[in-house]
Image: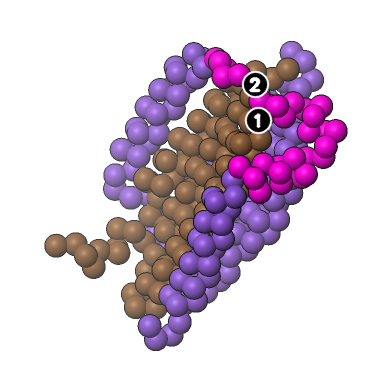
Chain colours: A brown, B purple
């Protein structure tokens, strides 16, 4: 039997890699992918808890997280394209129109 | 070391490596394709945890819809110039530091987790007797009916927002 803490550890490590990608990369698309990575790592821990607590609530929560992730990706990428039409760059440190 | 533990260790090591590959590739297309492999591994891990429905959803929605959306957006943008520039922002050591500190924090704290809550009614035998999709559907349409409706509203907002934002003239 695989202990529950192994799953939580895997999920935590993936979450931290996602945080690193989110904070360090310049490419906006890879930042979005890092967000998806973090959401997926949380999903793993929820499914693991759901399995070990013998309850289906965690899995239903994962269902909702996938819904929100799909909506977030669609809206975020639409904003990205709308921005790219005005100002053709997707480097986050060059997107500084609001900087004072 | 039993067979399930070996199986899990393979998945843990390969998923960590794949996550690192995803955030360190220069070309976003390569990142997305490594992400696809990572999603297949996650789906297999869901199967390992007796969540067949979520494994199918993971492949259909994430690998089939969201990643294809990412690929389409990469196709719409002209990224040839970006590929030759530096990959990381100036403050990348801060990001790496935050990641490492948080990872150490999790590693220290995870060993103290003990499942204390009372076990629910959906043991593996109960779920297998009823069918996984039927039992998850029962929970979804009774206890979680209001969140389900709110999720449909979120999807509606996403559809309208994406169409409005992608229009030529707003």
Image point 68% across, 59% down: which residue?
B64
Mark 2 nearby-residue class (10 Å; few <14, some 14–19, many ≥20): some
Q: Which residue is mark 2?
A: B119
Q: Chain of mark 1?
A: A
Q: Quadrant of the C terminus of chain A?
A: bottom left
Which element carries disc 2, helix, strand or loop? loop
Which element carries disc 1, helix, strand or loop? loop
| CB within 8 Å, label 2 to label 1 | yes
Q: Which one is in front, B105 or B55?
A: B55
Q: Is residue B100 left or right of residue B72?
A: left
Image point 58% across, 53% down: which residue?
B148
Q: Which residue is mark 1?
A: A55
Circle count: 2
In this view of the protein, can residue B35 be seen by the observer?
no
User: Based on the displayed image, in which of its 4 quarters is residue A50 positioned?
Assistant: top right
In this view of the protein, can residue A76 be seen by the observer?
yes
Rounded to the nearest angstrom, the CA distance separating label 2 from label 1 is: 7 Å
Image point 54% across, 25% down: which residue?
A9
Image point 83% across, 37% down: which residue?
B130
User: Based on the displayed image, in which of its 4 quarters is residue B135 positioned?
Assistant: top right
Q: Is residue B13 magenta?
A: no
Query: Looking at the picture, does residue A15 appear above or below residue A64?
Result: above
Q: Is residue B7 left or right of residue A23?
A: right
Span highlighted in magenta in the image: B114-143
Q: Position of residue B72 (x, y in %)?
A: 58, 69
Mark 1 nearby-residue class (10 Å; few <14, some 14–19, many ≥20): many
Query: Looking at the picture, does residue A81 appear above or below residue B35?
Result: below
Q: Chain of mark 2?
A: B
């Amino acid at each position: 039997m695989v202990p529950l803490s192994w799953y939580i550890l895997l999920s935590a490590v993936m979450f931290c890699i996602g945080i690193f990608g989110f904070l360090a990369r310049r490419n906006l698309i890879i930042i979005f992918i890092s967000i998806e990575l973090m959401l997926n790592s949380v999903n793993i821990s929820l499914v693991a808890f759901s399995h070990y607590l013998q309850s289906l609530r965690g899995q239903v929560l994962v269902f909702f997280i996938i819904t929100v992730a799909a909506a977030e990706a669609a809206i975020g990428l639409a904003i990205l394209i709308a921005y790219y039409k005005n100002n053709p760059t997707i480097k986050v440190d060059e997107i500084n129109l609001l900087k004072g | 070391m039993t067979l399930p533990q070996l199986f899990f260790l393979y998945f843990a090591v390969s998923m960590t490596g794949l996550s690192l590959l995803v955030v360190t590739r220069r070309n976003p297309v390569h990142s997305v394709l490594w992400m696809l492999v990572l999603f297949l591994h996650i789906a297999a891990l869901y199967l390992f945890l007796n969540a067949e429905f979520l494994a199918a959803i993971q492949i259909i929605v994430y690998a089939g819809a969201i990643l294809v959306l990412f690929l389409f957006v990469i196709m719409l943008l002209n990224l040839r110039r970006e590929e030759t520039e530096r990959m990381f922002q100036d403050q990348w050591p801060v990001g790496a530091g935050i990641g490492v500190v948080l990872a150490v924090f999790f590693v220290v704290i995870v060993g103290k987790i003990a499942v204390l809550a009372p076990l629910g009614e959906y043991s593996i035998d109960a779920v297998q007797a009823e069918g996984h999709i039927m039992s998850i559907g029962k929970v979804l349409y009774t206890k979680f009916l209001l969140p389900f409706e709110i999720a449909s509203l979120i999807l509606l907002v996403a559809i309208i927002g994406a169409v409005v934002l992608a229009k030529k003239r707003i």
